[in-house]
Amino acid sequence: MPQSLPFADPQLADAAAALAEWRSTLPRSSRIPEDLWSRATELAERHGVAKVAGALKLDYTSLKRRLTATAQRPTEGERTSPQSPAFVELNFGLPLATPACVMVLSDRHGRALRIELPRAASRDITEVARSLWQTRP
């Protein structure tokens, strides 16, 4: 059966050979050494997690998790800064805008009128409605 990723990359072939040798010498429940994991994550960056996991017979989720953790680590000389939060609430101490009064008027002919007034003007809404909807003979 063909491999999901050809071993044209010599580093991939070396990693596959090193993993095969390690697997043959230790019991199945042993943990894979960190140097083999780091080689696998470097290859996954180049060729993709699914292909490398299949070619090296590694657990996809474990390789993906390690690749993600490696990508988040700062390199040497790079400053570390805290991650910015997804949401920041800004409180300027300003009062909230007063809610508007919304009035929707419609008649039996299907005509409609929408009026938005500030709260301060809402007491005059009846008179506004009468003057707008009053029919003239």
Image (tube, rainbow, N blue to C red):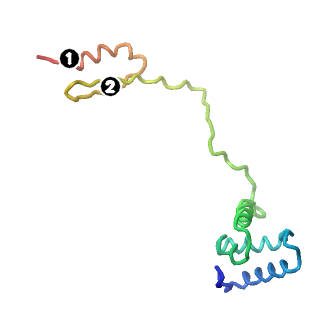
Q: Quadrant of residue 22?
A: bottom right
Instruction: Identify the residue at horizontal 77%, vertical 80% (top origin).
Output: 15
Q: What amino acid is at disc 2?
A: Val
Q: Is 77 left, or right, of 136 in this rendering?
A: right
Position of 45 with respect to 121 (left or right) is: right
Q: Position of residue 119 (x, y in %)?
A: 43, 19
Q: Quadrant of the C terminus?
A: top left
Q: Residue at x 23, y 20 (%)?
A: 133
User: Which residue is under mark 2?
Assistant: 104
Determine whether the residue tagged by mark 2 lies in a helix, strand or loop. Answer: strand
Q: In the image, what residue occupies the spot 70% across and 67% down?
A: 60
Going by the picture, which residue comes out furthest to the right? 26
Q: Position of residue 61 (x, y in %)?
A: 70, 64
Mark 1: which amino acid? Gln
Q: Is residue 1 above or below residue 46?
A: below
Relative to 37, 110 lies left or right: left
The picture places residue 20, in percent across and down from the top left corner, at 80, 81
Q: Which residue is mark 1?
A: 134
Count of numbered tags: 2
